[in-house]
Amino acid sequence: MATKKFNVTVNGTTYEVEVEEVKAAGGAPKVAAPAPKAAAPAPAPKAAAPAAAPKVAAGAGEHSIDAPMPGKIIKLVAAEGAAVKAGDVLLILEAMKMQNEITADADGTVKKFNVAAGQSVKAHESLVILG
């Protein structure tokens, strides 16, 4: 059987591989390649998002406004202790390259933000406690 040598570049690292052509029972050639001779470099770790204050759960007479989808907090619009009405914008959540306004679902007071600007959040994660 014929063996051919090839140079393959993966992530900037060049590997020399040998490929042997093998005829399969169906007549189609089957290609088998041995393991590369050099190890690929490991990717660099990503930087962590800014840390937020410890999360606070809703107490008696309070309720949580949760993230409707995963994304990144762009801006906190309301302030802790501010009185808000239903429909008032509390913060801006960026998801899928769109900025989404997260609004109050009822009249109340902003008791605590569980997130900070620049922080990534998961779906259903508590963002704000209203009381």
Image: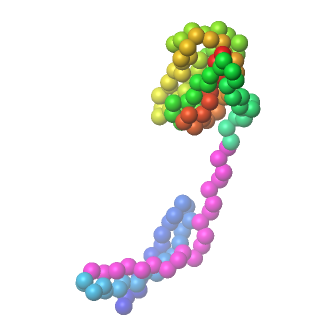
Q: In screen coordinates, is 79 left or right of 98?
A: right
Examine the image and state in which quarter residue 14 appears.
bottom right
Q: Give the percent coordinates (x, y) of residue 75.
A: 61, 22
**Residue 57 visible in the shown view:** yes
The foreground one among 92 and 80 is 80
Q: In screen coordinates, is 68 left or right of 19?
A: right
How many labels, in total? 0
Up/down of 52 relative to 41, above or below: above
**Residue 75 visible in the shown view:** no
Q: In screen coordinates, is 22 left or right of 26?
A: right
Examine the image and state in which quarter residue 38 appears.
bottom right
Q: Give the position of the N terminus as an image quadrant.
A: bottom left
Report the residue that reaches farthest toward the right: 54
Q: Give the percent coordinates (x, y) of residue 25.
A: 27, 86
Secondary structure mostly seen in magenta is loop
Q: Give the percent coordinates (x, y) of residue 121.
A: 60, 35
- Residue at the (38%, 79%) spot, across then down: 31
The foreground one among 95 and 11 is 95
Up/down of 84 relative to 118, above or below: above
Task: Read off the magenta span.
Answer: 28-47
Q: Give the position of the C terminus as an image quadrant.
A: top right
The foreground one among 72 and 123 is 123
Report the residue that reaches farthest toward the front: 60
The foreground one among 13 and 103 is 103
- Residue at the (48%, 73%) spot, across then down: 7
Up/down of 39 relative to 49, above or below: below
- Residue at the (51%, 30%) spot, across then down: 68
Q: Is 74 colored magenta in this rendering?
A: no
Report the residue that reaches farthest toward the bottom: 1
Q: Give the percent coordinates (x, y) of residue 36.
A: 54, 75
- Residue at the (71%, 31%) spot, across then down: 55
